[in-house]
Image (spheres, grey):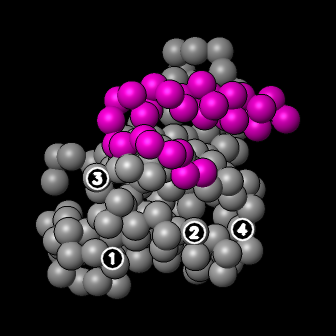
Amino acid sequence: ENYQMWDYLISELPSVIEKNFNVDISRQCVMGHSMGGHGALTLAMNHPDTYRSLSALAPICHPTGTEWGRKQLTAYLGEDETRWARHDASLLLRARGWPRDFLVDQGDSDEFLALLNPDALAKAVTDSGVDATLRRQAGYDHSYFFVASFMADHVAWHAARLAA
């Protein structure tokens, strides 16, 4: 009950940033890695008017479609599966789409590929007609080296979209 990351990211943190820094709060982006990538995708897809740019590195793409994901959703959200859909990027794309392009990088040697389920996201992108750049990076796993190798691409991606 005291860990409300969704509320923190959507309202509390932007409010603190806006009060303390000279920023244009209408130009926000979100990105993350692994579970943070899952959070970035679902947060943006649930709040498309808030985020102008979206990317993820090795995100969990379809938690309702894996045993591990279902276990986590039950732990966080309870047994009511109707509450889970807004926390599954693949389902959200089909239901709501996404109004702009987004970027996802995934290592093809990631030991967690079955859990991350990037193929489900790729299918949802195709089925929904959303504009996305989904890159499979040969030889990369889930590690810090993977994130460090493609972080500059993601920063540049966001910078270009926030400047537009």
Q: Residues within 10 Å of mark 4 (few under 14, many from 20)?
A: some
Label 2: which secondary element: helix
Residue position for label 2: 122
Callout 4: SS: loop
Task: Looking at the image, tell me whether mark 2 or mark 4 is earlier in sequence order.
Answer: 2
Disc 3: which residue: 111
Q: If you read the primary sequence from the N terminus, does the residue marked by circle 4 or circle 1 appear first? A: 1
Q: CA distance from mark 4 to mark 3?
A: 27 Å
Q: Which residue type carries mark 3?
A: Glu
Q: CA distance from mark 1 to mark 3?
A: 19 Å
Question: For numbered disc 3, what is the local secondary structure?
Answer: loop
Q: Are marks 2 and 3 in contact (CB under 8 Å)?
A: no
Q: Is residue 101 above or below residue 124?
A: above
Q: CA distance from mark 2 to mark 4?
A: 10 Å
Q: CA gap, disc 4 to disc 1?
A: 21 Å
Q: Residue at x 14, y 66 (%)?
A: 75
Q: Amino acid at mark 4?
A: Val
- Residue underneath mark 4: 130
The answer to whether residue 33 is above or below residue 114 is: above
What amino acid type should be assigned to the residue bearing mark 2?
Ala
Query: How many angstroms separate mark 2 from mark 3 (CA)?
Result: 19 Å
Q: Earlier in the sequence, mark 1 or mark 2?
A: 1
**In magenta stretch: residue 139:** yes
